[in-house]
Amino acid sequence: MATAFFDARSKNARALLEGDLQVVEQPEAADLVWLRGGHKKLAGRLRAGQLINYIPGESALIDKGYLSQYLKLHEPGEGDPDLELEDFYPETFCLYDPEERRAFFEQLPPEESPEQLWILKPADMSMGRGVGVTWRFEGLRQLYEMVEREGADDEIRPYIVQRYITNPLLLDGRKSEIRLYWLIASVDPLLALVYGEGTVRLNNQPFSLGDLDNELVHVTNVFQQKRHPDFDAELELKWSLPDLETYIVERLGRGEFGLIEAELKPKLKAILQFALEATRHVLEPGPDGPLGFNLLGVDVILDDTLRPWLTEVQLGPGLSHGDQVKREVLPGMLREAAQIVLEVQRRRRQGGSLAHLDSVSRFEWIANEAARA
């Protein structure tokens, strides 16, 4: 049986995997090391060939500002998905970049208007913290003018501003978001897969575009929703992808059963492939040390035309599984992810091919450079 080390903060991952792996108390003795923090420090202590859930350069994907900039710089080449950035990524500006900041303020209309809605997000935070919807920017403009005069950019938290999707697909009248889980099993060669099942997160209160100060309406994050004083714990906040499809087909009368598999999933895979190609050159395998991999989340909003919009990529997506929907998705997802990276490790040790992995079952390929070699 393969061995694994989990740090104290990785209780959920340990709970889901300890039946399949032998847990050890020292990371140096483990085949697979799973951490919630301190990856760089510990990576230097690990021997060649050990697995660690950390990829040097991964901030290019998980930092909202870096991701935005790499996506905009990417020029699709031969073999890339037939996709333009504006097809799936809301217009975004990094306010901590002087050129992008000036471009953002210059494109604003002369008169502030609630028809020009944007969402402010800290580039380096997660769990919905610091997120807000606004159309008033005069105060922010004055702040950044002062910052530029005083040369104090480093003292301002890095924010991005993203055009707000004003026509989200409503489920029972509420805004929603799809969470998918995907795995970068190797960087060299690049092996990346997305799990075939995901979850749908619903907001706690009916959508109202004008109710901008209510997080229960606009911020689709369960952590933030539950902190709100008006949170209704009786409402269902999680659906499965089959639940979503049933609602679209039966309640909304849109399309036929099978639309998620036939129409939505290919679009989602193309989006993830685009993001990988845009950041591929900064993801690093690491110098003769542990084998880096990572399990990531991706959040997607469907608009009322069923177009998917990428909002962010998440490091360490939540693995709590207290609700029924996540209990049906996460255990199988995480176990298969562990089996995949352990098979990659085993084949490397034996000098075997990575073109086909026997452990791939419910995960689906996004990129497999070994198969193209």
Image (spheres, rainbow, N blue to C red):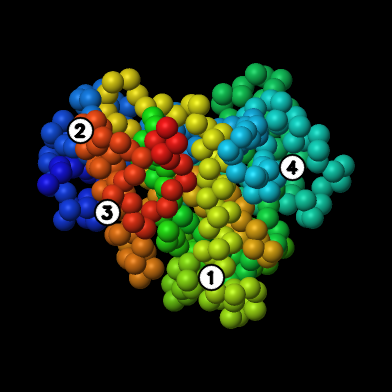
Closer to the N terminus: mark 2 or mark 4? 4
Q: Which mark is residue 294?
A: none
**Residue 189, quarter of picture:** top left
Q: Give the amino acid at mark 4.
A: Phe
Q: Secondary structure at mark 1?
A: loop
How many residues crowd around disc 2 within 10 Å: few (fewer than 14), some, or many (20 or more)? few
State the CA–CA distance, disc 1 to disc 4.
43 Å
Q: Which residue is mark 4?
A: 137
Closer to the N terminus: mark 4 or mark 3? 4
State the CA–CA distance, disc 3 to disc 1.
26 Å
Q: Which residue is mark 2?
A: 350
Residue found at x 63% / y 73%: 255
Residue 73: x, y in percent? 64, 30
Residue found at x 52% / y 50%: 269
State the CA–CA distance, disc 2 to disc 4.
59 Å
How many residues crowd around disc 4 within 10 Å: few (fewer than 14), some, or many (20 or more)? few
How many residues crowd around disc 3 within 10 Å: few (fewer than 14), some, or many (20 or more)? some
